[in-house]
Amino acid sequence: MKYFYYVFFLLSISASVQSQNLTLEDYGRAVSYMNNNLNNKSVFNTYTSANWFKNGSGLWFVDYTKDGKTYKTVDFKNPTVKPLFDHQKLAKAFQETFGQNINPTHFSLRNIDYDDAKHLSFSTLDKSYVLNLDNYNLQLKEEPKTKRDPFESTSPDGQWIAYTKDYNLYIKSTQTNEVHQLSFDGKRDYEYGTYYGWSDIIEGENGERPKRFSVEWSPDSKWLFTKRIDLSKGEKMYLLDWSIDSLYKPKLLSYYRGSPGDTNLVSERPVFYNIDTKKEVKTDFPEFTHLNRFAINWSSKSGVLFAEYIERGYKNSYVNLVDLNNSSNRNLITETSETNIDNFSYQKLEQKDVLIFLSERSGWRQLYSFDLKTNTLSALTKGDFYVNDVSYIDESTGDIYFLASGKEPGDNPYHQRLYKVSLKGKMTLLTPENAHHIVSFSKDGKYFVDNYSTVNIPTKTVLRNSKTGKIITQLTEADVSEVVAKGWTSPEVFQLLAKDGKTTIYGAIWKPTNFDSSKSYPIIDATYTGPHTQRFPKSFDVAFSNQSLSELGFIVMQVDGLGTSGRSKAFHNHSYKNMENNLEDHVLAIKHLGKQYRWIDTDRVGIFGHSAGGYDTGRAMLGFPDFYKVGVASAGDHDFRMEKVWWPEMYQGWPVDETYEKVSNITNAKNLKGKLLLVHGGIDENVNPSATFKLAEALVNEDKEFDLLILPSQRHGFTGKANQYFTKKRWNYFVEHLLGVQPIWDFKLD
């Protein structure tokens, strides 16, 4: 009898395991939820782009259905939605005029605009056309044969052409061809009229970086701004490109890129010229490193400009008023922080003699004004909410249209709405729906298109009046009926208290469409702790972002813990010099979900992420080795000392101190217990693969078992066949090591 029960138990276990094996049908279902197989193919109009006609008469957009797509328009004088053209007649015109058979529901048109009331121009099939809307006569449109020289800049009045020669800056009269040399000490690596390009790849041992050109003319053509770039002391990072079929040795690639704490950085000096005198106008601006932005904004007054710059360490930012007529340089706005400044911005209202700017000086990102006449600063908005950005400014009235999150009682703090505020601080809500609003303004600011939704509420796209926010007409509405009929449900939003025991944090989970609450599911953390972004899915167009992976038998989670952006400054500051602890709230969230839902198995926890999310994944496996069991870290910046200088010095601080050693995945390699797959693009110039190689070396030295995948032809964002290969590899890594079943490799992603 005991033998019988033992055999029965083994058979039961075997049947249970067998029933959990994945099939090609399961993989096919996962593939069907990939964005390129889903968006506007079985799920329609989750986001609709507005395209405004240049003449200000209206807009056009594309309405997608299961039958194809229809180009539609709204005329502001008669604001009803109607077809932009007769699709059948246009298809017939293509066939009769050019012998091309095009499905009338599958046009792919771009650059659409009116030449006049009867003629519509557009581009398709790499050519430009003009359509007579009365008789549907279709003709090829002559393209301008003259192309602008990218290494020249003509002054607004057309009198001068600026260009460079032998690393110096020149101007030439368009009337007489007389040439004037403006700079004289330029040479290779000490260059005028150029800029430092983030991805300026240099080929070979002694190659030159790609030629760059940049100047900014004043509106009256009397002044010229450029930069002198000094590359002579800048340090480089290196790559080897093994992917070129015709080469049997790798190609050496390099680029100028400083790392945190480096003193030998590419530097730049702002340079101004008086066109009348052909002389440089000296200013007292210092030399800047390439990571500290210096930008100008010309005033309408001749020779007067606004200059914005930030000091290394990101704790002090300035806006100055510069008058080149007398070489004066006066500070207007100083922004300071004990941690960092990573979201300061300003704009000018020329007609009102006012600057407006966004600042976290109150503890929340708010909107402020600076009166140039009285030199007084005023808060235009006040409260415990976050101003995301300025969408439009009405120069004549001074009304400022802006998006803000968390202002209305009961709103999710990540959902933004549109408001307008006067220069006296009177604020008006323009989008009353409790949702996340993504807006696009017409050029004259009289109208805006609003895509509003949540991750649970399908998108509605409407045209609204800017003054009142009143809906003029609906353009599209998302249609998800096809996937709902197959069992899809939207992600489930959750909230809990963060590690400080008082702050509410938010996240969402995705479940497979064949979800069975009687089963137990592993949970995967889809991470990117930023700290400059958020992961909470705010709108419906991202409602399917983790569905594919979930279809293979997982619960997938995204959450924003303390230290990420978009909340208070205190919330954001949790990550400063403390990025090794960004995942503590993720662990709390998973434990919280495990207590709430018995179908979540918190003993089987996985994690994946790309770039900063790749660092997170490494950190999870090495900093929380008893909690996270399987990780896929792609393009990870595993040691900030080997990273580009900007991101770490912003969030881990400058000067470089002992915290960099503490947060390094490389120095914590000894802690690995679970299954870790490291992935990197071989020619990634954003996050150099050196840190992934160094982490691999550290894991080898610690005798830790791990997996490594290098995609030789790939940069930071994986594309094409390599991206498909990586997607399959990531899916199957979790299938094999977290789900515990045999993966299938032979399936197609398209």
Image: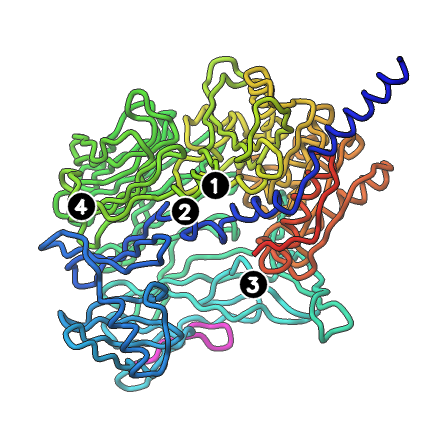
Q: Where are the magenta residues, as a range? A: 163-173
Upstream in the sequence, badge 3 or badge 1? 3
Question: For this rendering, which residue is in front, 433 or 43?
Answer: 43
* 159 lies left or right of 423: right
Q: Which mark is residue 564?
A: none
Question: Where does label 2 land, which residue?
Answer: 43
Q: Nearer the viewer, residue 703 or 175?
A: 703
* Label pair 1/4, CB-CB below 8 angstroms: no
Place of residue 351 in the rendered image (x, y in percent of width and height, measured from the top left): 15, 49
Q: Amino acid at mark 4?
A: Thr
Q: Residue 307's spot in the image, x, y percent?
A: 35, 50
Dot 2: few (<14), some (14–19), or many (≥20) neighbours within 10 Å?
A: many
- Locate the C terminus and report the quarter of the image it occupies: bottom right
Looking at the rendered image, the disc whose residue lies closer to the viewer, 2 or 1, is 2
Tell me: residue 631, above or below residue 301. above
Residue denoted by label 3:
200
Judging from the image, what secondary structure is the residue with disc 2 in? loop
Check contact, mark 4 vs mark 3: CB within 8 A: no
Is residue 661 visible from the viewing direction of this image? no
- Asked whether the beta carbons under mark 2 and mark 1 sit within 8 Å of each other, the answer is yes
> Which callout, 3 or 2, points to the residue nearer the camera?
2
User: Tag 1: residue type?
Assistant: Phe
Is 172 colored magenta in this rendering? yes
Q: Name the residue located 73 percent from the left edge and 37 percent from the top edge.
A: 741
Q: Which residue is mark 4?
A: 473
Taking depth in this image into account, of 719 and 69 the one nearest to the observer is 69
